[in-house]
Image (cartoon, helix red, strand yellow):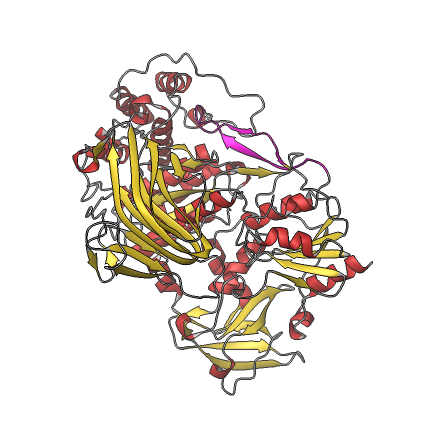
C-alpha cells in the first residue's frame, strides 16, 4: 500500500527503531568526529552487513573527519542502509535538521529524514539525492507536537549502490542548539512507583473472582481510551491498576465491588460535557459494545457513571493511542518493561488487559474470531496469573494471540524461552502439508543424510512415535493464524521438525507406499541451506520469457524500475504470468496494476477506527487504479497460495481488477492491510492487522484470503516430479 517513498519509509520504520522505542539521545557527535569500532558514537547504523562504514580523514567538510559508507558490488536487490539518531520529545515548536552530504555513484538514491513517533510526522527531501555530487548542505524542518511525541528520529537512508559522506550535522529547536532544549514529559511518565514490581499478590481464584477480574479489565480498558484525564497523560494507567488491585481482590460481594469501582472512577476527577461527541453511525461496520454492563449486572449508579463518561468521552489525540499515517492505530507510551525477565503477576495481568482492550477498541476484525472476543478475557486470566516462569508466560501470551486469528499476529518479539523450548535443531530437509499429508518437498543438505533414503514426495506419518495428527492437535493452539492454510504453512516450515535433540525418529511412506523408518540427524539452522516461506531470488531477473508468447514476472525480487520495462518487454505477448507466491520487494499495485485496467477501477476499500469513538469502524472511500496509457491486451494469470500474505494479497487484489486477469492457486494467508505494533510487559511484542480490507462490494478478505478464480493445488505427484503445477496451469490457460 505504499509509493516508492512510502516503501522506503516503511523499511526505515522496520530497521531503524527498536521494539521498545526508548528515546535516548546518547552522545551528540553531530560532526562525526568520534568513532568506536568503526561506528560513529551516538548513531545507529543498520545495513552494515552490506554497507562498509569508515571514518574518513581525507574527505571531510569540517573538523578532522567525516562518516563514509560504501556499497560494494552485491547480488542483493535494492540494498538499503539507514543511519539514525534517536532523540526524546522536546518542548518547542520547530525542529531543524541540517548537514553536509557528498555522494558518488549512479545506481542509488538517498535523502535525509526526520520522523516523529509514533507515526506523527515524516519528512524528507522533495527529491532524493542521486548521482555524484560534491559537498552540499541539506536542511529539513518539522513542526513539533511534544504532547503527542514519544521520540524523534533524525538521520538519512541510502538505497542502491554507491558511496556517501556525512559531516557537520546540526539539530536546532526554535533556532537554538538542541543541547539547550528542554525535554517534555507527561505526568504519567514521571510515575516510577512500581518500576521494580507491582507488589500485587493474588489469592487462589474462584469463578467469582475471575469474573471480577474480567470486569476490572473491561473497566480499566474503557477508562483508558475514554476518560479525558487518562487521555491527557495525567496517569500511568498500568501503575494505577496496581494501586487499585490489592483492595479490589478482597471484595466479597457485587455491591462492594461496584462501590469500589465507582470510587476509583470518581478519583479521576470530573468529566466535562462534550459538545462534539456524536452517536455511533448507523453505517458503522463495527460498533462499540457496552452490553457488558448488563452482563455483569452493575449497579445503576456505576452504569450511569460509565454511560456518562462514554457520552462525554475524550475527542482527538490520546496519550495511549493515536492515528498512523494510514489511519491504523499507533499505541503510544506503552511500556514493554523489558528489564523484567519474568514479570510478576500484576504485570502479567496488565499484559492480558492491554492486548484484550486493544483488540476490543482498535482491531477491525474482533467480530470474526473463532472464540467470541467478549469471552476471551475471562478465559485467559488464570493462565496469565499462574504463569510463574518465563516459558509459561510466553505460552500464555501466544495462546492469547492465537485467539486473535490473525496471521499478522504472533509472538514476534521476546519469545526466547518459547523458541528454546521448541528447539534449536532442524531437519536437513523441508516438509509441507500437501493433500493433507506432511510431505518432503526439498532436501536442503543431501550430504547430511548420508545413507538415509528419503526423497521428495515421501510422506511423514510419525515423529518420535507420535502421529502427525497427534502433534498437530497439541501444538496448533500455540500457532496464531487467520486460517488453517497459513497455520499449517508455519507449523510445517518452522516447528514440526524441530527439537533440542541431535536426532529424531521418523516413520514415512516412500513413493511405492512402503513404510520406512529412519533416525534423522538434526542440525542448527546455521548449518543448513534452509529458507523460509520462499527461496531468495537475489541476483535473478524478476521477469523473463517462458516462451516466445508468454512472459513471466515474479514479485519476489522485483524493483521499482522493472515495472516500465515489463510493460515494454511484454507489450505484444499473448499472456503474462505474475507469481505472487512470495512477498513483493517493491510496491506494484499501481505501478504494474495500471497496465491491466482500461478505465479507472476501484479495487479495495478499508475500514478505519473512529478515534473519537473507540470501537466504531467505518468504511473509507474505495482506492482506484488509473490506467497507464494503452492497457495490456493479452491474458494475465496471477499465481497465489498460502505464502501470499499482506502486501502480496493487496497486490493480488489490485491485479485482479484488470480487464483480463485470472487468479489461480489456493487460499492465501488471510492477513492484509497495515499492521499496528503492540508491546507487552517483559519485552514481548506482536502486531495486529490495523485496517479492515474489503473488496469494493464489501466482501471481506481477512481470514478468507484471496479466493482464486480457479483452484489449483500442489500434489504429491507433482512434488516427486519437481513440477510447478500452478505455472503449468497458467500456461495452459493463456494458450487456450
**Can I make out residue 243 in this image?**
no
Report which quarter residue 193 is drawn in.
top left
- Answer above or below: position of 63 versus 309: below
The residue lying furthest to the front in this view is: 134
User: How many labels were placed on the picture?
Assistant: 0
x, y percentage for residue 259? 29, 22
> Does the magenta portion include 574?
no
**Can I make out residue 61 in this image?**
yes
Indicate the quadrant containing the N terminus: top left, top right, bottom left or bottom right: top right
- Answer above or below: position of 493 versus 400: below
- Answer above or below: position of 716 versus 47: below
x, y percentage for residue 575? 75, 56
x, y percentage for residue 464? 47, 74
Q: Nearer the viewer, residue 735 or 295?
A: 735
Indicate the quadrant containing the C terminus: top left, top right, bottom left or bottom right: bottom right
Write down the region rendered in magenta.
599-624
The residue lying furthest to the right in this view is: 736
Q: Nearer the viewer, residue 670 or 95?
A: 95
The residue lying furthest to the bottom in this view is: 451
Indicate left or right for 65 with 386 as reference.
left
- Answer above or below: position of 24 versus 414: above
> Does the magenta portion include 616?
yes
x, y percentage for residue 719? 65, 71
Q: Could you tell me which residue is drawn at 30 percent across and 49 percent down?
A: 683
Indicate left or right for 375 with 469 as reference.
left
Amino acid at each position: 500500500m505504499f509509493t516508492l517513498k512510502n516503501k522506503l519509509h516503511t523499511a526505515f520504520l522496520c530497521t531503524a527503531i527498536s521494539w521498545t522505542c526508548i528515546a535516548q539521545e546518547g552522545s551528540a557527535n553531530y560532526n562525526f568526529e568520534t568513532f568506536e569500532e568503526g561506528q560513529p558514537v551516538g548513531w545507529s547504523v543498520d545495513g552494515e552487513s552490506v554497507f562498509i562504514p569508515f571514518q574518513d580523514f581525507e574527505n571531510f567538510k569540517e573538523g578532522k573527519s567525516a562518516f563514509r559508507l560504501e556499497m560494494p558490488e552485491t547480488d542483493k536487490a535494492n540494498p538499503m542502509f539507514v543511519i539514525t539518531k534517536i532523540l526524546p520529545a522536546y518542548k518547542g515548536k520547530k525542529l531543524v535538521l541540517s548537514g553536509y552530504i557528498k555522494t558518488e555513484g549512479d545506481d542509488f538514491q538517498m535523502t535525509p529524514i526526520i520522523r516523529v513517533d509514533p507515526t506523527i510526522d515524516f519528512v524528507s527531501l522533495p527529491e532524493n539525492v542521486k548521482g555524484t555530487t560534491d559537498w552540499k548542505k541539506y536542511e529539513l524542518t518539522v513542526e513539533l507536537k511534544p504532547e503527542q511525541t514519544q521520540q524523534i528520529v533524525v538521520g538519512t537512508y541510502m538505497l542502491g549502490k554507491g558511496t556517501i559522506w556525512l559531516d557537520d550535522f546540526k539539530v536546532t529547536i526554535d533556532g537554538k542548539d538542541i543541547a539547550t532544549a528542554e525535554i517534555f514529559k507527561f505526568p504519567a511518565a514521571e510515575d516510577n512507583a512500581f518500576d521494580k514490581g507491582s507488589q500485587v499478590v493474588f489469592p487462589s481464584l474462584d469463578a467469582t473472582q475471575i469474573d471480577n477480574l474480567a470486569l476490572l479489565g473491561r473497566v480499566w480498558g474503557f477508562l483508558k481510551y475514554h476518560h479525558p484525564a487518562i487521555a491527557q497523560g495525567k496517569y500511568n494507567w498500568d501503575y494505577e491498576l496496581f494501586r487499585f488491585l490489592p483492595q479490589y481482590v478482597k471484595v466479597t460481594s457485587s455491591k462492594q465491588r461496584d462501590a469500589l469501582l465507582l470510587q476509583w472512577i470518581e478519583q479521576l476527577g470530573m468529566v466535562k460535557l462534550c459538545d462534539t461527541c456524536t452517536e455511533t453511525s448507523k453505517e458503522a461496520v463495527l460498533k462499540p459494545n457496552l452490553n457488558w454492563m448488563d452482563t455483569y449486572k452493575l449497579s445503576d449508579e456505576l452504569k450511569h457513571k460509565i454511560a456518562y463518561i462514554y457520552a462525554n468521552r475524550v475527542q482527538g489525540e490520546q496519550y495511549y493511542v493515536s492515528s498512523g499515517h494510514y489511519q491504523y492505530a499507533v499505541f503510544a507510551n506503552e511500556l514493554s518493561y523489558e528489564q523484567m525477565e519474568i514479570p510478576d503477576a500484576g504485570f502479567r495481568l496488565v499484559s492480558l488487559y492491554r492486548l484484550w482492550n486493544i483488540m476490543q477498541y482498535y482491531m477491525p476484525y474482533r467480530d470474526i474470531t473463532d472464540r467470541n472476543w467478549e469471552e476471551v478475557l475471562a478465559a485467559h486470566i488464570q493462565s496469565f496469573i499462574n504463569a510463574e516462569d518465563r516459558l509459561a508466560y510466553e505460552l500464555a501470551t501466544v495462546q492469547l494471540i492465537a485467539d486473535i486469528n490473525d496471521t499478522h499476529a504472533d509472538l514476534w518479539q521476546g519469545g526466547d524461552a518459547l523458541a528454546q523450548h521448541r528447539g534449536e535443531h532442524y531437519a536437513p530437509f523441508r516438509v509441507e502439508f500437501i493433500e493433507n499429508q506432511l510431505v518432503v518437498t526439498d532436501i536442503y543438505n543431501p550430504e547430511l543424510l548420508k545413507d538415509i533414503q528419503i526423497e521428495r514426495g515421501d510422506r511423514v506419518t510419525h515423529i518420535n512415535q507420535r502421529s502427525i495428527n497427534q502433534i498437530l492437535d497439541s501444538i496448533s493452539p500455540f500457532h496464531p493464524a487467520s486460517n488453517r492454510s497459513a497455520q499449517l504453512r508455519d507449523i510445517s516450515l518452522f516447528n514440526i521438525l524441530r527439537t533440542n535433540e541431535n536426532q529424531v525418529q521418523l516413520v514415512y511412506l516412500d513413493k511405492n507406499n512402503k513404510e520406512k523408518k529412519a533416525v534423522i540427524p538434526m542440525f542448527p539452522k546455521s548449518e543448513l541451506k534452509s529458507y523460509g516461506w520462499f527461496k531468495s531470488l537475489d541476483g535473478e531477473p524478476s521477469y523473463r520469457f517462458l516462451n516466445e508468447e508468454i512472459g513471466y514476472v515474479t514479485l519476489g525480487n522485483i524493483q521499482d524500475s522493472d515495472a516500465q520495462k515489463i510493460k515494454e518487454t511484454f507489450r505484444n505477448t499473448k499472456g503474462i504470468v505474475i507469481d505472487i507466491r512470495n512477498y513483493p520487494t517493491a510496491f506494484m499495485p499501481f505501478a504494474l496494476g495500471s497496465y491491466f485496467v482500461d478505465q479507472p477501477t476501484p479495487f479495495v476499500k478499508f475500514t478505519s477506527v473512529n478515534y473519537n469513538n473507540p470501537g466504531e469502524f467505518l468504511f473509507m472511500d474505495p482506492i482506484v487504479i488509473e490506467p497507464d496509457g494503452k492497457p495490456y491486451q493479452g491474458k494475465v494469470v496471477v499465481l497465489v497460495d498460502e505464502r501470499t500474505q499482506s502486501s502480496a494479497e493487496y497486490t493480488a487484489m489490485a491485479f485482479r481488477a484488470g480487464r483480463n486477469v485470472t487468479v489461480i492457486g489456493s487460499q492465501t494467508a488471510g492477513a492484509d492491510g497495515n499492521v499496528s505494533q503492540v508491546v507487552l510487559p517483559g519485552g514481548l511484542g506482536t502486531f495486529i492487522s490495523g485496517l479492515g480490507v474489503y473488496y469494493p462490494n464489501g466482501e471481506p478478505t481477512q481470514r478468507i484470503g484471496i479466493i482464486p478464480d480457479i483452484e489449483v493445488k500442489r500434489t504429491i505427484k507433482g512434488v516427486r516430479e519437481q513440477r510447478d503445477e500452478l505455472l503449468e496451469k497458467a500456461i495452459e490457460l493463456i494458450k487456450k
